[in-house]
Image (spheres, coloured by chain):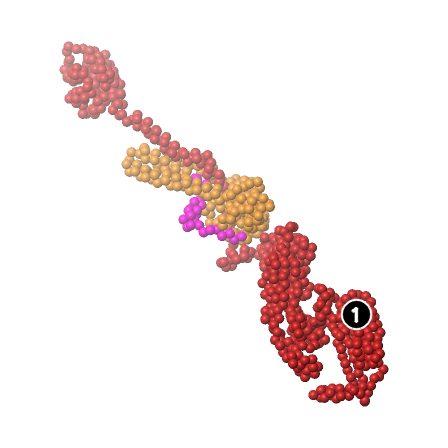
Chain colours: A red, B orange
Amino acid sequence: MKIKLSILTLLLFCSTLAFAQVKFVATVDRTTVGAGEIFEINFSINANGERFAPPTFTGFQVVGGPNVSNSVSMINGVTTASMGYGYALVANKEGDFTIGPASIVSGGRTYSSAPIKIKVVKGSGSNNQGSGQQQQQQRGSEPDERNMQRGRVKDISKALFLKTSVDKSTVYLGQQIMMNLRLYTRVPIVNGEPEKIPDLNSFYSQEIKNNNPNAQWRTEILNGVRYNVTDIKKTILFPEHEGDITIEPAIMNFVIRQQAASSSGDPFDAFFGGYEDVKYRIKGTPVVIHVKPLPMAGKPADFTGAVGKFNIAASLDKNDIKANDAINYQLKVSGSGNLKLLKPISPSFPPDFEKYDPKVTDTITENENGASGSRRYTYLLIPRHQGDYTIDPIKFSYFNPATGKYVTLTTRAFPVKVAKGTGDNSNVTAFSGAGKQDVKVLSNDIRYIKTGSELNEVGSDFYDSGLYYFLLILGPLGFAGALVYGKWRDKNNADVVGTKSRKAGRVAAKHLAIAKQRLAANDIKAFYEDLFRGLYGYLSDKLNIPYADLNREKIADELKARSLDESLINEMLDTLDMCEMARYAPVSGISGQQVFDKAQTMINNIESKI
Amino acid sequence: MLKRIIYLFMIVAMPLLAFGDASLNAQVKKGNEQYAKGQYKEAITTYQKIVDDGHMSALVYFNLGNAYFKNNDVPSALLYYEKAHKLSPGDKDINFNIQFANQKTTDKVEAPVEFFITRWWHSFILRFSLTTLAVISILLMITGFALLVVYRFTNSVGIKKASFYSALLIIFLGLGSMFTADRQQQYFDGHHGAIIFSNSVNVKSAPNPMAKNLFLIHDGTKVEVMDNNNGWMRVKLANGSEGWINASDAKEI
């Protein structure tokens, strides 16, 4: 209220203006600027002026202004007025430029300002991105008031919008893209909250963390208009499939403050709070990313999808150890690209090394230049056996999108010398076989040697030898031989009767021979006795009748049974009777010689018949 | 007849019990003494010389295996234990030491559990050595047939009966012994083993150094040799896994 009153008072004295010497000067805030930097030029006159004609800002672009300022001051009755025309300029090119004179009419006279030389040097960085878009590097946490549009904004969509920008719109599969969701505003924002943030389903996304919770505002010139710009979200995207991927627009709701509709240009309304808060929903623009497949030509067999630019280094902490000691094998992949998406590299360690899953340490930073850093795989290896081993070189392939070619890197090989471990040498109680000691054996040993000094050397080849088979067959052969022998013996011995009868003729001849001696000696009695015994013996053997059982009837029956002639049987019986009689009484009518011949003929007859 | 049988016995027994000459026995004794004193390296040299001279004896193999074991050479110990086991399959000491030495090897090869009848059968046919079985079967066969001869020629009915039935029984036992010997021979032919001597051996899928590695085995592991081809050995583990190894990586039992 106090300020209001004093301004009113000041204005009342405006009529009593007294003109002092008029000066019209042009000033710049600096005469050496970087290309793309915004600088200000001010034309000021210490009097009331009119018909101000700005110079042609050749070589520069007007990005703001003119900002006209009027001021009247009255001090001790002396009233001074001044006017100022401010422009914000941006130099487009490097070089020396001259801003020509501006003119103004004051009190009927025309004043010109002195020309100003501006030296434009090379800009300090990321300018000139995109067409007609220039950026001021100066940053502040508060939006620059100078960029605010004065008065009521007619078209809010031009004064407040979201822009999704990507650094590349045509990429290879897996190549990283920087996506930046930016808010451009020329109106004051009271409040804003996102309604929809694009879901990046087709990408592996890595948000760049912003440590500052407050929005970082900066000024950017887009198509000649200055905007306050802040990054809402910065994301590094790694496309996961080929084709055209559309990033859906983001939607945000804002509450913006603008002058109330009723206050039609009244400059005081701004002072007196003539504004209103308006809700406004803005939608960004969709962005299409064209994802190309990785070329098939020259694709290494071991390529696992690393895209970017990488380096690989391997190291081993020890290469001369004992068995069961641990060694560390470190593999470091550094560079920029989809490091986090790297598939685990599985080096082919000697199979005898116990290998544990690698410890993965990421040192990856995400910034405006993309994701870069290193990933470190630390493998713990425990050789279990002595020997000389070699850890083979590891091949790592990646695709360099900048050159469009595959690159294969190879680490060096590491020889590892493993000495016999201490664990192996310990006594019997230590079992090196892991997990084998189900039973806790405290002290155990092999059985002692066999101390029998008698070396029973066993011919182990005896089993299949010829001797073995010969001896085996010996039993059956011997038995067979025994059988044959037995059979032969039985055949000869079986016919006891036949044997006897075969022998009978000889026995009879023996008997008869004795009888013949008796006859020659003329011992008739003894002759007949011997003849009788000889015949009886012969018949007993021949007919197989025991001597004791032999009698006249039996002889007749047996001889009949053997179908001998009746006459022969009778003759035999007669001869036997005669021999029996002759033992007791002398025989007449027949001589001893005749009887002897008769007996012999009979025996011969029987022999031939039976 | 009795005289003849005794004579046959002598023929059978003589070549089997070829008692080593005195110097050989002295060497064994020397080795045993060295072993007893703990001079295992010297004992190995002594025993090894006997073996290298071509003498095959379960006792020497066993003692040599023990000496190797004490010298921390488990694969060699196992090789000679297995050789001893082959000569004398029923020897409990040998079997125990094989089991014991196997605990010191790296690979734990789980053999599938045999059906109990199979297990019994194997322990039965491996109860006696091949030579013992051969002698037993020869003696039984000869005795059996001798009894049959007695049966044939005796006149007494009692002896006839007794000799006939005992002859049948003994011949049957003899046939059984022959069959057992044959089974044991088949068993060792079918289980032609080898011991891995290299520290670690990659078992390949084909007899070719470029072939894929199937699995890894270590020294001391017993494998079954299925084929021998051009310096390569087709081996089978107790758990059934098969593959090819360099013949120089293993020694056959």
Relative to residue A81, is residue A371 drawn left or right?
left
Report the front residue among A364 and B238. A364
Q: Quadrant of residue A358?
A: bottom right
The answer to whether residue A17 of the structure is visible from this angle is yes
Report the front residue among A420 and A564. A420
Relative to residue A84, is residue A491 drawn left or right?
left
Q: Is residue B119 magenta?
A: yes
The residue that label 1 is drawn on is A57
The answer to whether residue B80 of the structure is visible from this angle is no
Q: Chain of mark 1?
A: A
Instruction: Single out the residue that lies furthest toward the front.
Output: A108
Q: Position of residue A577 (x, y in %)?
A: 15, 17
Q: Quadrant of residue A548?
A: top left
Q: Is residue A469 above or below residue A207?
A: above
Look at the image and give the residue range highlighted in magenta: B107-136
Q: Residue at x 15, y 13 (%)?
A: A587
Q: Position of residue A531 (x, y in %)?
A: 21, 17
Q: Residue at x 76, y 73 (%)?
A: A88
Relative to residue A529, is residue B213 drawn left or right?
right
Q: Position of residue A535 (x, y in %)?
A: 21, 18
Quadrant placement of the N terminus of chain B? top left
Task: Inspect the image, locate mark 1, and give the three-letter code of the amino acid beneath it.
Answer: Phe
Q: Is residue A498 above or below residue A256?
A: above
Q: Is residue A416 above or below residue A132?
A: above
Circle 1 packing at 10 Å, graded few (<14), some (14-19), many (20+), is some
Dot 1 falls on a residue whose secondary structure is: loop
Q: Residue at x 55, y 53 (%)?
A: B106
Q: Is residue A428 magenta?
A: no
Q: How many marks?
A: 1
